[in-house]
Amino acid sequence: MINSADHSEREHDEWSASSTERNVTCAGAIALNSRVKTPEKESEAAAWGTACHQLSEKCFKTGKDADEYIGTVEKTKQRKIEVDEEVAETTQMYVDYVRNRLAEYKKHAGPNGAPAVVHHEQRFSLAALKGPFPAGGTGDTVMYFPVWKLIEIVDLKGGRGLVEAAGSYQLRSYALGAMLTNQGLNIEKVRTTIVQPRAAHKDGRIRSETLDVADLVEWTADLVAAMRRSKQACDEFDTMPFAAWSAKWLTPGKCKFCPSEGSCPALEQRALDAVGVWFDDLDKPQISNSPANDTPEKLAETLDLLDMIQDWISARRAFAHQQAEAGVVIPNYILVPKQGREKWKDEDGVEAKVKQACALLSVDKYLNPAKLKTPKQIRKALGKKENLVAGLSVTPSEGTNLVRADKTTRQAVPSAVDKFFNIETE
């Protein structure tokens, strides 16, 4: 069962499941965000993720695979995303997981076992907690397995930023919401699963956390306590000097996608401290520079902070852009039109004119040849004859990436020192 229209049409509660981790970490986030008056703009990354969700809904409705939609377009709030191989592969991993779990349960339950119940895009409310904010969210897929006495919530993450399943406040909020929405079920355990196809995690691209219902109920008490802290921060916003309020209630750490990310004073100070920025007597920014910064330990410490710094820089630029578009004059900066790329207004009309005016012009002079489909698409089309193209494809790897050792499943490449000793011993 699919309970919503487009994924892009979701409305968010003041305390949404997706913002829970941020609100728990930073009690002042809701109060600060309520004062942010900037037009909502959909990023390319957000639209890309929305397109994957919308495509998955089509797959669940029709029973088709995602690659059958390659070349089509998904319309989101403000963008159009063409379904390419990466969109299809990301979507398919999620669709396959859901289908496989249902097949696994059906096989285990047997012909006489109670069938699984499935909801896609199921909206839920946490109003039963009687918290101080409207709270709720939407579960991508909610499955109830009666024989297992288990309810499972599956969440598709289209981004590359690693998301943990264990201890996730967002996923536990989904689990709680699913239980409250689907009352009367015989449930002993709750399982939350993240499907994140584009992020290589040490626990795999699909990872889960399973909790006893009693443990989830105990966690709920912590959630309500966090809501009350946020309410206190809201109540004190207009009664304290802003600097004192910020110091008390703003805690940077889970700032990604926060509407105030580009204007939060606490995050700005943390970012400046992280890169060692200080201001001289002429109020000009300076960056500290010392040999201590070159030690491996200092480099590791800095690398751990770079994502936060880069996110803040991007958010700060976006905030300045929004302010300028809203009419705020920023000294020494102006809005200019983006440079576009020339394109045809009517491709069919152009082709017809060329054919009519240039009868002797060969087709290859104005039409690009058809493009060979990807290895995965051709293997799927060949089915049992996929061995016909065995060995004809390659997945090249050029250069290296520097990543945290505990955040990847890839093997480390030999270092320059290792290579030197290998040469010496040969």
Image (cartoon, rainbow, N blue to C red):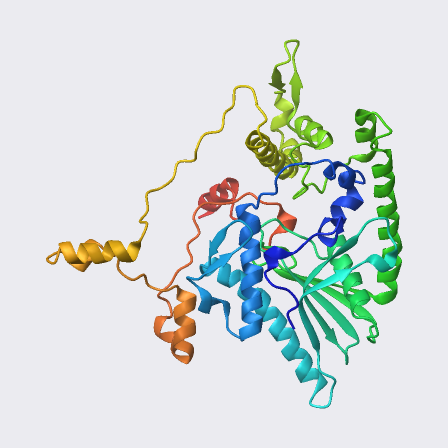
Looking at the image, is 328 positioned above or below residue 77?
above
Q: Position of residue 333 (x, y in %)?
A: 52, 23
* Residue at 48%, 53% in the rendered image: 80
Q: Nearer the viewer, residue 14 or 119?
A: 14
Looking at the image, is 127 positioned above or below residue 141?
above
Residue occupying the far bottom of the picture: 112
Q: Position of residue 39 (x, y in %)?
A: 61, 39
Left or right side of 234 for 8: left
Residue occupying the far top of the picture: 281
- The reply to whether residue 104 is in sight is yes
Looking at the image, is 56 positioned above or below residue 248?
below
Query: Considering the image in quadrants, where does the N terminus appear?
Result: bottom right
- The reply to whether residue 411 is in sight is no
Give the quarter of the image for residue 76: bottom right
* Residue at 52%, 47% in the rendered image: 44
Q: Nearer the viewer, residue 261 or 392?
A: 261
Left or right side of 367 for 56: right
Q: Position of residue 33 (x, y in %)?
A: 73, 39
Q: Position of residue 210 (x, y in %)?
A: 77, 65
Numbered circles on residues, count = 0
